[in-house]
């Protein structure tokens, strides 16, 4: 049998190759033509751009030259004003002409030509007759008209005589082919009261500035314009391209020219060779690529033939592979044309739990059923001869559990037609259950099992679509747990989660079946109560919820007490939009929490207004921090032993642009809630330390630190930075902390106070006796002193109980080696009683109200002087 080579079998590919080669040749020809056209367009564009650049450069140079001329005119005008509006010039050149004063003494002589190059200086009388002239620095008898060859005076006088015009005018004339600037001003005494005015027509001073080629060239060089001159056809031609500027002068046209920069020439010089080189390179590359492409075209067609042969073999292989792959997934089954099982794979019992023998001969529809359609009709659907898949068929396992599978089938086709069906079943029970779990979690809180935000909004919008009425409104209750954060901090998040789970159960117990309680997140819950019969029911429900949540929670042997605050918004009374209802109930909740907690409040429009005012106040506070609208005042502290002021407490004030001076109690709480307290504290520390170092020599300065700020270690960094920047001795800085600042986290507070003590500052317990701590805190925390709250001092010395309490506190404080400062001292009786009780220091209106630095210095000096006088009197 004769063997054929590959070349003998590629008749069709040869034809394709010729077609491919022809297509490639046409494509290459088109590409080369487009490339050539592109380079031609690029070259013409380059030339056009260069021409436009040169033209723009000449226009710019012309404008600069005009600007130079205007500057020359301005200079000439300023000079002639200085000389014409001069009292001495009026006396020596108008009333009489004094050449000795004008020329010999160089008041208006050759110096104007030497210094300013003004070729002509003329004085004209009221009849326009030349009375004094200096031409090119030399005294002359020639008149202005004779020297110029023209009389510009009428034109100048016409300009000066216009309404509201200054007694000054200028014009340009031609003199020997060059432009000459002529400026004229009326000679006045310049408001010089020592020079009397002379009756008669005023005289005029005329300056002439001839712009010869030398001046023009110099003027042009100042603006980067080279070789500027008057264009003269008889003058020798200069090299290079020339720019021109035409000016109208006395009805004639004067043309100035200069050497053009020609920036476009440089562009052509560098870019055009590159374009030519690029065109050459591209042409060479295109020729090489065309040979390579034509060579590869033949190889491509030869490979196409071999690929066609391989594809036939691959198709047969893929058919066998597909049949095998379909038979290896999970369990496999076959049925006859009546859909009765004729064969089941060995994996069928392991997955379903049923035996093979119990189902052979049984219909497949008795074992499985599909969703929303008949499985038998789907399998026997006419015209379907290929492989098909059906998702989510259901069947029962031998244990009676619901299971799910995906099936794939293919009819068994012979010459007699379809004789049966062959398929696979993939068990997807775990996948379906996971999807159901995901669907549940997407609408419910995983921890408590309550509906989440998504489900809550769906429920709320559905109830709002039912259009609640004023008689039967819908209520949204925003609930926030009180004192829940300490539960997590003290007992751990595991206990906190159990508390939340128990809270959810109690809330479900409080509401009706058609109501909904949802968890917003954290310790926040939402209750939606539709179809309310009367407001009394809602009041009772809120009371019941708070009562339930005030009952103790017993978790892991611990009795935990929390509370709750509620905010209530009604639809349609307050709003009919879900977002508005949630926002309004949150406002009412916020108001309830700030009003004492463990209570409920209904939303009112005033709450929204208060929230707006709070946001505006917060924005103003942020601006105040940025713009430093704060100031410090200082209240002195008086030593009873030395009768001197020994310290001052720094107190902040806010100078509000609209509200005026605000006290700390009007904005510090807001600063703590918004996190702005750190920035304010940093400013107070730095300002107080700087003032103490610069203006309060020898005095200690005390700064209050809020309980919120005292929880963060940032206070240590801020104190260190303030001391470092001000160079203040750390021993002169005192930090005042309230008792309650140490309650939240005593261990952290102790470490923080030790860090401050390591810096060298002193620590004072402010408002002692008003907080929740006991005297044991004085032993556990490193305080240097305590400040008795003014509530203990107010009853002294009349109240014996007040005297006894203060005496005991002073005694206990001294037992702990602490300095004692009494606040709120306002009378001499209180001062004397505290001195008898051996109190160390006092502070109050008796010694001085809060005051600025200057007033504090004066108060200190006065007290020191009084103490010195008492000492001298005693001696």
Image (cartoon, helix red, strand yellow):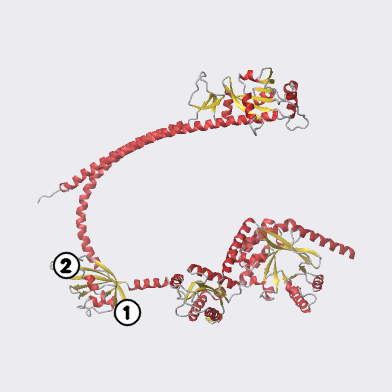
Residue sitting nearer the eye, 625 or 10: 625
Query: Under tag 2, what secondary structure?
Result: strand
Image x and y of residue 95, in percent: 75, 24
Q: What residue is pinned by disc 2?
A: 413
Q: Is residue 793 visible?
A: yes
Measured in 3D between alpha carbons, the distance from the residue under mark 2 to the one under mark 1, in whole angstroms, is 36 Å
Residue reaching furthest to the left: 1
Q: What residue is pinned by disc 1?
A: 401
Image x and y of residue 362, in percent: 21, 78
Based on the displayed image, in which of its 4 quarters is residue 737 positioned? Answer: bottom right
Query: Under tag 1, what secondary structure?
Result: loop
Comes first in the chain, label 2 or label 1: 1
| Figure check: 288 above or below 553 | above
Circles 2 and 1: CB atoms closer than 8 Å? no
Residue at the spot x=55%, y=71% of the render? 603
Left/right placement of residue 266 relative to residue 730 reads: left
Image x and y of residue 118, in percent: 65, 24
Image x and y of residue 343, in percent: 20, 74
Residue at the spot x=58%, y=66% of the render? 609
Residue at the spot x=63%, y=27% of the render? 156
Residue sitting nearer the eye, 106 or 401: 106
Q: Is residue 211 visible?
A: no
Residue sitting nearer the eye, 335 or 521: 521
Left/right placement of residue 550 relative to residue 842 reads: left
Q: Which mark is residue 867?
A: none
| Figure check: 865 above or below 422 | above
Based on the displayed image, in which of its 4 quarters is residue 314 positioned? Answer: bottom left
């Amino acid at each position: 049998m004769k063997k054929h080579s590959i070349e003998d079998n590629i008749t069709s590919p040869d034809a394709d190759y010729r077609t491919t080669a022809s297509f490639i040749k046409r494509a290459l020809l088109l590409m080369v033509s487009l490339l050539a056209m592109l380079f031609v367009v690029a070259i013409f564009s380059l030339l056009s751009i260069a021409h436009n650049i040169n033209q723009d450069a000449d226009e710019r140079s012309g404008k600069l030259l005009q600007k130079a001329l205007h500057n020359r005119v301005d200079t000439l005008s300023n000079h002639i004003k200085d000389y014409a509006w001069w009292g001495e010039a009026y006396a020596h050149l108008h009333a009489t002409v004094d050449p000795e004063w004008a020329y010999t003494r160089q008041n208006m002589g050759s110096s104007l030509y030497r210094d300013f190059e003004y070729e002509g200086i003329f004085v004209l009388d009221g009849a326009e007759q030349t009375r004094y002239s200096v031409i090119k620095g030399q005294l002359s008898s020639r008149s202005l008209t004779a020297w110029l060859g023209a009389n510009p005076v009428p034109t100048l006088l016409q300009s000066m005589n216009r309404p509201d015009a200054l007694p000054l005018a200028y014009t340009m004339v031609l003199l020997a082919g060059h432009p000459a600037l002529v400026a004229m001003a009326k000679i006045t005494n310049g408001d010089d009261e020592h020079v009397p005015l002379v009756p008669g027509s005023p005289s005029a001073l005329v300056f002439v500035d001839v712009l010869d080629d030398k001046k023009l060239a110099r003027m042009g060089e100042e603006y980067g314009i080279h070789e500027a001159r008057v264009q003269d056809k008889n003058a020798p031609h200069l090299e290079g391209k020339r720019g021109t500027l035409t000016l109208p002068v006395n009805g004639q046209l004067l043309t100035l020219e200069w050497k053009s920069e020609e920036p476009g020439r440089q562009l052509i010089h560098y870019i055009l060779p590159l374009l030519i080189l690029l065109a050459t390179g591209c042409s060479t590359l295109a020729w090489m690529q065309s040979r390579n492409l034509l060579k590869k075209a033949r190889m491509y067609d030869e490979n196409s033939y071999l690929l066609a042969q391989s594809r036939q073999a691959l198709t047969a292989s893929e058919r066998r592979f597909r049949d095998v792959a379909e038979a290896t997934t999970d369990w496999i089954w076959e049925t006859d044309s009546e859909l009765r099982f004729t064969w089941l794979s060995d994996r069928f019992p392991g997955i379903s739990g049923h035996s093979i023998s119990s189902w052979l001969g049984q219909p497949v529809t008795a074992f499985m059923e599909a969703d929303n359609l008949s499985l038998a009709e789907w399998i026997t659907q006419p015209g379907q001869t290929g492989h098909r898949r059906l998702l989510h068929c259901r069947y029962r396992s031998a244990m009676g559990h619901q299971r799910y599978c995906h099936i794939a089938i293919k009819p068994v086709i012979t010459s007699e037609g379809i004789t049966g069906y062959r398929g696979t079943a993939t068990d997807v029970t775990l996948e379906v259950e996971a999807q159901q779990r995901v669907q549940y979690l997407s609408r419910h809180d995983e921890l408590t099992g309550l509906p989440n935000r998504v489900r809550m909004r769906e429920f709320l919008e559905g109830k709002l679509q039912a259009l609640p009425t004023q008689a039967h409104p819908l209520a949204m209750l925003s609930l926030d747990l009180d004192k829940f954060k300490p539960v997590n901090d003290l007992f751990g998040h595991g206990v906190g989660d159990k508390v939340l789970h128990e809270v959810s159960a109690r809330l479900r117990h409080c509401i009706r079946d058609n109501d909904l309680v949802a968890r917003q997140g954290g310790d926040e819950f939402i209750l939606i109560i539709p179809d309310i019969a009367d407001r009394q029911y809602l009041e009772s429900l809120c009371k019941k919820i708070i009562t339930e949540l005030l009952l103790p929670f017993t978790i892991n042997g611990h009795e935990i007490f929390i509370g709750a605050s509620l905010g209530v918004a009604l639809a349609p009374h307050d709003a009919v939009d879900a977002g508005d209802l949630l926002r309004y109930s949150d406002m009412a909740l916020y108001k309830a929490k700030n009003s004492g907690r463990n209570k409920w409040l209904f939303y009112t429009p005033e709450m929204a207004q208060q929230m707006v005012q709070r946001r505006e106040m917060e924005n103003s506070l942020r601006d105040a921090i940025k713009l430093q609208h704060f100031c410090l005042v200082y209240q002195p502290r008086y030593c009873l032993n030395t009768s001197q002021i020994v310290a001052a407490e720094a107190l902040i004030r806010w100078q509000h642009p609209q509200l005026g001076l605000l006290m700390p109690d009007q904005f510090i709480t807001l600063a703590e809630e918004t996190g702005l307290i750190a920035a304010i504290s940093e400013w107070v520390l730095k300002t107080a330390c700087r003032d103490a170092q610069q203006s309060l020599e020898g005095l200690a300065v005390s700064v209050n630190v809020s309980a919120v700020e005292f929880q963060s270690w940032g206070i240590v960094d801020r104190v260190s930075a303030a001391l470092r920047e001000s160079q203040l001795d750390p021993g002169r800085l005192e930090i005042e902390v309230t008792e309650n600042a140490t309650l939240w986290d005593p261990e952290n507070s102790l470490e923080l106070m030790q860090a401050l003590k390591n810096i060298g500052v002193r620590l004072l317990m402010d408002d002692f006796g008003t907080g929740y701590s006991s005297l044991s805190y004085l032993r556990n925390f490193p305080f240097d002193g305590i400040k008795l709250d003014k509530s203990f001092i107010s009853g002294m010395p009349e109240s014996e109980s007040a005297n006894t309490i203060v005496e005991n506190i002073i005694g206990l404080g001294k037992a702990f080696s602490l300095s004692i400062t009494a606040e709120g001292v306002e009378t001499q009786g209180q001062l004397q009683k505290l001195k008898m009780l051996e109190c160390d220091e006092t502070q109050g209106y008796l010694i001085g109200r809060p005051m600025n630095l200057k007033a504090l210095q004066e108060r200190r000096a006065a007290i020191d002087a009084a103490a010195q006088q008492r000492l001298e009197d005693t001696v």
